[in-house]
């Protein structure tokens, strides 16, 4: 389920976390609180502005049906269905309540799957072995291609959902079925268990899972056997376009530049290079950030990409 409090609220990093080299002097507690308040206020204003923005003519003429509509047929303008891949502790609905309608209004056929379920654990998914989750994605993509008649899909994933598909592309033949992978705050080179624990305040009840057997968490820890295998021989595979969208206010996958990929066909994007007023952190960038969403659309249709700025929040 979605958190009861606003997902854009930042939490202070644990005192034991070591600052990255070259980082600024540690601010005072009062300064940190002020900065967090300003960031939260700015994100709130962006979100409110988005809800008040008038629909464009293109949006008004776009399909009004929701996502996971298996009668949807890709158009000439958007010939590939978009498969959304949720993050750790997420699910196929809650992670995409903003982005899925955003894409549907722009004429895309949009689908989302649940993966990484643990027996007896409802709602909180993405916790099973990541290699097995990639197998679930493989099956789901085949279902979407069969239903829509398309030759390829585009994948858009948040957090683990931006990293896990790389296993599918590299080891399960996914590169033949995927045109592009767009990762929103993906943990491509891992994080720490402490970093994953930063997610817990957003998902009431999820803390209990840390004491259970959760291979999906262990696989995401930097240096895990899963990540070593995934990143051996290079970050990418031929024939797929990769986009990574990151925020410098990241507090789960740190340092934020560890999200970026190396290789041909890669575009790494830092939100604050496009809009310095965007203060989204790990959760907000996936759940409500329209500036990030504008970059997602640019990645899905680079031939018609338009500049992403702070004004993209009302686009």
Image (cartoon, rainbow, N blue to C red):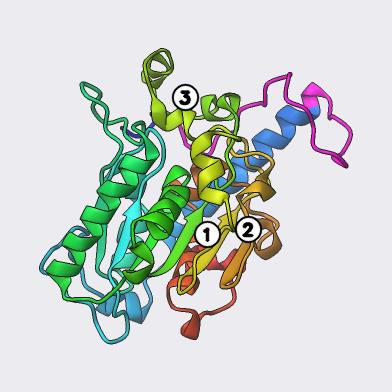
Question: Nearest the camera: 61 or 303?
Answer: 303
Numbered tag placed on residue 292 in the rendering: 1
Q: Residue at x 45, y 55 (%)?
A: 166
Task: Classify mark 2: helix, strand or loop.
Answer: helix
Answer with left or right where residue 307 lies relative to residue 298: right
Residue range corresponding to the magenta coloring: 5-30
Q: Label 2, on which residue?
A: 271
Q: Quadrant of residue 269?
A: bottom right
Report x, y in % for residue 271.
63, 58
Q: Is residue 129 magenta?
A: no
Specify which label sits upstream in the sequence, 1 or 2.
2
Numbered tag placed on residue 200 in the rendering: 3
The quadrant of the picture occupied by the N terminus is: top left
Report x, y in % for residue 184.
50, 53
Q: Residue at x 88, y 42 (%)?
A: 22
Q: Residues within 10 Å of mark 3 (few under 14, many from 20)?
A: some
Give the spatial CA distance, label 3 vs label 1.
23 Å
């Amino acid at each position: 389920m979605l958190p009861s409090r606003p997902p854009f609220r930042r939490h202070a990093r644990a005192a034991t976390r070591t600052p990255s080299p070259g980082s600024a002097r540690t601010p005072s507690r009062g300064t940190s609180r002020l900065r967090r308040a300003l960031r939260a206020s700015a994100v709130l204003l962006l979100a409110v502005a988005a809800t008040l923005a008038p629909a464009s003519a293109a949006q008004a003429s776009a399909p009004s049906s929701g996502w996971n509509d298996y009668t949807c047929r890709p158009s000439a303008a958007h010939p590939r269905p978009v498969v959304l891949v949720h993050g750790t502790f997420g699910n196929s609905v809650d992670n995409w309540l903003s982005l899925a309608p955003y894409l549907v209004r722009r004429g895309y056929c949009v689908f989302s799957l649940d993966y990484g379920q643990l027996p007896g654990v409802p709602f909180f998914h993405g916790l099973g072995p990541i290699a097995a989750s990639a197998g679930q994605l493989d099956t789901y993509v085949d279902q979407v291609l069969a239903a829509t008649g398309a030759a390829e899909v585009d994948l858009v994933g948040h957090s683990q959902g931006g990293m896990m598909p790389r296993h599918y592309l590299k080891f399960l033949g996914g590169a033949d079925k995927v045109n592009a992978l767009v990762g929103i705050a993906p943990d491509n080179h891992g994080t720490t268990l402490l970093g994953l624990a930063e997610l817990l305040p957003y998902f009431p009840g999820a803390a209990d899972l840390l004491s259970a057997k959760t291979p999906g968490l262990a696989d995401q820890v930097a240096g895990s056997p899963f990540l070593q295998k995934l990143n051996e021989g290079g970050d990418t595979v031929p024939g797929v376009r990769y986009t990574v969208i990151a925020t410098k206010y990241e507090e789960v996958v740190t340092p934020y530049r560890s999200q970026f990929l190396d290789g041909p066909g890669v575009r790494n994007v830092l939100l604050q290079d496009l809009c310095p007023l965007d203060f989204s952190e790990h959760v907000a960038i996936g759940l409500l950030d329209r500036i990030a969403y504008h970059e997602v659309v640019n990645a899905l249709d680079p031939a018609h990409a338009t500049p992403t700025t702070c004004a993209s929040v009302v686009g």
